[in-house]
Image (cartoon, helix red, strand yellow):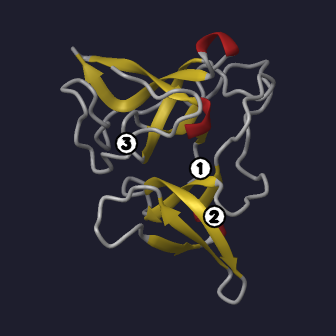
Amino acid sequence: MKTPSADAPPSKKQKTGTPSTPTAQPPSRGKKSLPEEPQAGKQPAPTGEEEIKQGDKVAARVSGPTEDNENDMWILASYVKYLADKKKIEVEDEDDDSNQGKKHYKLNKKCVIALPKVFNPNQIHAKGSQVLAMFPNTTTFYPAIIDREASKQSNNFYGLKFEDDEEGGKLVSRKVNFKYVIPLPKK
């Protein structure tokens, strides 16, 4: 499987779950539950509370919430501006599949999370932590669990196991750049 470079954005060909290879399918919703607690002794991971500037990449919840968060859809977007009169944040979908141009959303602040910009080895998600991460070769974020922490030796990539992403009955570990991994939002 081809992985994006540390600085290049991932491919934007898929958002709805179409696999890029027969084995790289975004997880389906439902069945497996993720462990609850991260490993002790690690610094807290970034919270997404950093100041967001025009053009910054964000994770944006464009559908949901539901009682069980099963229908939440988080996508890769760019921050456009804050609409003070409406108390909303305008974002632009990074997926440009349509001939109409990129889609814009006006969302509540809780539906927009800043993505990390700089790798900080003191603020990584610990092995076993629940996160929201962009599935490889898509622009959609899914729940995952940290299987391997990001480090300079791994070119700042995490090893992640996405919910229901199985091959041969086992969860598959996929490489995802730290820029596309955020804490799992609280329900």
Which mark, by number, is residue 129? none
How many angstroms separate mark 3 from mark 1 (CA)?
Answer: 20 Å
Tell me the element at label 2: helix
- Left or right of 135 on screen, residue 55: right
Answer whether labels 1 and 2 touch (C-beta < 8 Å). yes
Q: Which residue is mark 1?
A: 185
How many angstroms separate mark 2 from mark 3 (CA)?
Answer: 23 Å
Q: Which residue is mark 3?
A: 138
Q: Which residue is mark 2?
A: 110
Tell me the element at label 3: loop
Counting from the top left corner in percent of width and height, residue 132 is at 52, 41
Residue at the bottom extreme? 85
Indicate the amino acid at tag 2: Lys
- Local packing at callout 2 (Cα closer than 10 Å; few below 14, some 14-19, many 20+) is few
Q: Is residue 141 among the parts visible in the rendering?
A: yes
Eyeballing the image, is 140 above or below 112? above
Task: Identify the residue at horizontal 37%, vertical 57% (top origin).
Answer: 71
Q: What number of labels is visible?
A: 3
